[in-house]
Image: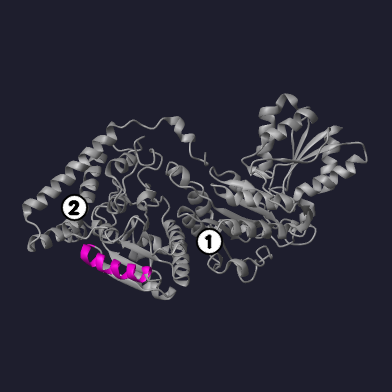
Amino acid sequence: MYDAPLDLYARMMLIRACETQLNDVFARNLFPGYIHSYLGQEACAVGVCSLLGDGDKVVSTHRGRGHYLAKGMALRPMMAEMFGRASGICGGRAGEMHAADPAIGVLGGNGIVGAGLPIGAGAALGMQLDGAGAVAVAFFGEGASNNGAFAETLNVAAAWRLPLLLVCENNLYAEMTPFADTVAQPRVAARAAGYGLPGETVDGNDVFAVRDATARALARARAGDGPTLLELETYRWGGHFEGDPKKYRSRDEEAAWKARCPVARLRAVLLAGSDADAARLDAIDAAAEAGVAEAIRFALDSPLPEPERALDHVYAA
Amino acid sequence: MTTKTYCWAIIDAIREEMARDDRVLLLGEDVGAAGGAFGASRGLFDTFGPARVRDTPISEEIIVGLGVGAAMTGRRPIVEIMFMDFFGLCLDQIANQAAKTRYLYGGMFSMPLVIRTSVAVEMGIGPHHSQSLESWVGHVPGLKVVMPSTPRDAKGLLKSAIRDEDPVIFIEHLALHRMKEEIEDGEVLIPIGKADIKRPGRDVTVVATGLMVGKALAAAEILAAEGIEIEVIDPRTISPLDIDTILASVAKTNRAIVVTASLKPFGFGSEVAAQIMQHGFFDLDAPVVRLAPPFTPTPFGKGFEDFLNPTADKIVAAVRELLA
């Protein structure tokens, strides 16, 4: 949990630096596999996760680095995992779409759109049975809201009043298809009413708005009043994956959303207040950049996993 | 010793394990107040209450997903998918999530999840309720698959499954639910991955699973009258397969037949046959025979299943042919 505006800024900058530098590494052909960039959505992860404790669980998606870093996963082992190295937090077995750290309640990413929702409900059931006031958060994209897992999860979570936050990052594009082209009701939060739980649409590029909505949802969940669907309106700066030519949207649209950059907006708020001056924020930026660069070097310098390790962990030893 | 039906043996196993470990939960359609669609959770709701014995909506994907998430947060869930034919609705949670979580994350999570399900072969309920799909899940690394053929095996294997740290698909044959057997009153634990020789014999090894075990034993009686002694082996666990017990038998008999309700192509019988031929080739006097339903869905009308499925008579005929 972290509340100070400068801490929120630092975490968002860490994600920004991570995603920016990974794109650069990818462009230089040094990255194995695909990159599903979190650029542009930083306020969503930080706004939600900054209010969670280590006992609270997070289930992520294929676009999960923002969630991992916002929840407090150590940068170096996370980065090494992205590169599939032996020093990765999962030994290089999980890769770019998955990472987990049970010590801080990160229950993993997912390569299957929507599959984390039922697992999040299961974790919330575990929290409900524990009775200690912890919650589970299931992140998903608006594309997953057209999946059957979404419907099943909303229904059960509401019926059982599970301590679950259903956090939809609506970045407008389900892979390469505009979300609005595939639905008659593009307001994801509106679906909550049909299942009997509260739904709220929030400016996902305003970290304070995200935090306020999250705090309300957490209070409900921790009080035993059940789940909340939060729809965070945001924008995926990159394509579905890096290299996606993004023919399905205009450069004007991208520019308009970049003008609503969540990091720049927080920076402007901080500069307008009395907590920070430009030099202090620049120092935070530089520290984030340096930390990420060091982590990427660590990853690239780390050995590949021994191939025979592929046979480990299929079953309990 | 107490005489128990297969169904009550299952209830006893769940009851004993829920009493022993309060992390054990039971989730599924009709498992609570109704006592189970087939009566296999009678009394558990009253004993353990609605927090631990939960009726779910008809939502197979989240039934399994609830189990996955609860297992990742310290519970030991038993989830029920009423018929194995419904696995199509939740296969992602089974094959991608439950099965791979330990592996993907380098052993950081255990997955103590039991997925109970029923195979209703020869119950006459038509093509969406009659499939024996153990071969589907046998193909998924990370899953264990058990298929008991007697009440005692059902009890002992279910208790072991609940205590296992890996996801176990527990396949019940509905046609066996009323089968009776004497079971000792103390703790019954049968290890997963260990075959059982249901009847010793010297002439032909007959590997049979689930409902087919009884047919093989009936065939053995008929053949014994002719002086032919078949050895009936029930693997009990589909995966991991106890091939050693089977190979030891083949080394003695030099002939093998595999009898399954799983369809013949790409099925469990094919795997057993391949392993026998790979590891026991020089013990064999004849090719391994697979007795299994042909490559067709299961129709409803009476008579179809007898035509399609292995029967005691078909096993007898196959043994005679193999020895001819």
Judge whether B46 appears above or below A39 on screen.
below
Coordinates of residue B75 in the picture (x, y in percent): 50, 56
Q: Residues within 10 Å of mark 1 (few under 14, many from 20)?
A: many
Residue drawn at the location 20% of the way across and 47% of the way down: A17
Coordinates of residue A136 in the picture (x, y in percent): 39, 61
Could you say which is closer to the camera, residue B108 or residue A82?
Answer: B108
- Please state the extent of the stretch shown in magenta in the rendering: A205-222
Q: Residue at label 2?
A: A10
Q: Amino acid at mark 1?
A: Ile
* Side (left or right) of B85 relative to B226: left
Label drawn at residue B63: 1
Given the current orientation, which residue lies at the most extreme top position? B282
Can residue A206 be spotted in the picture? no
Coordinates of residue A181 in the picture (x, y in percent): 35, 65
Can residue B170 be spotted in the picture? yes
- Residue B55 picture quarter: bottom right
Q: How many marks?
A: 2
Which of discs 1 and 2 lies nearer the camera? The answer is 2
Coordinates of residue B251 in the picture (x, y in percent): 75, 28
* Side (left or right) of B229 relative to B77: right
- Per the model, the C-alpha gap separating discs 1 and 2 is 39 Å
Residue A134: say if magenta: no
Q: Residues within 10 Å of mark 2 (few under 14, many from 20)?
A: many
* Side (left or right) of A283 relative to A308: left
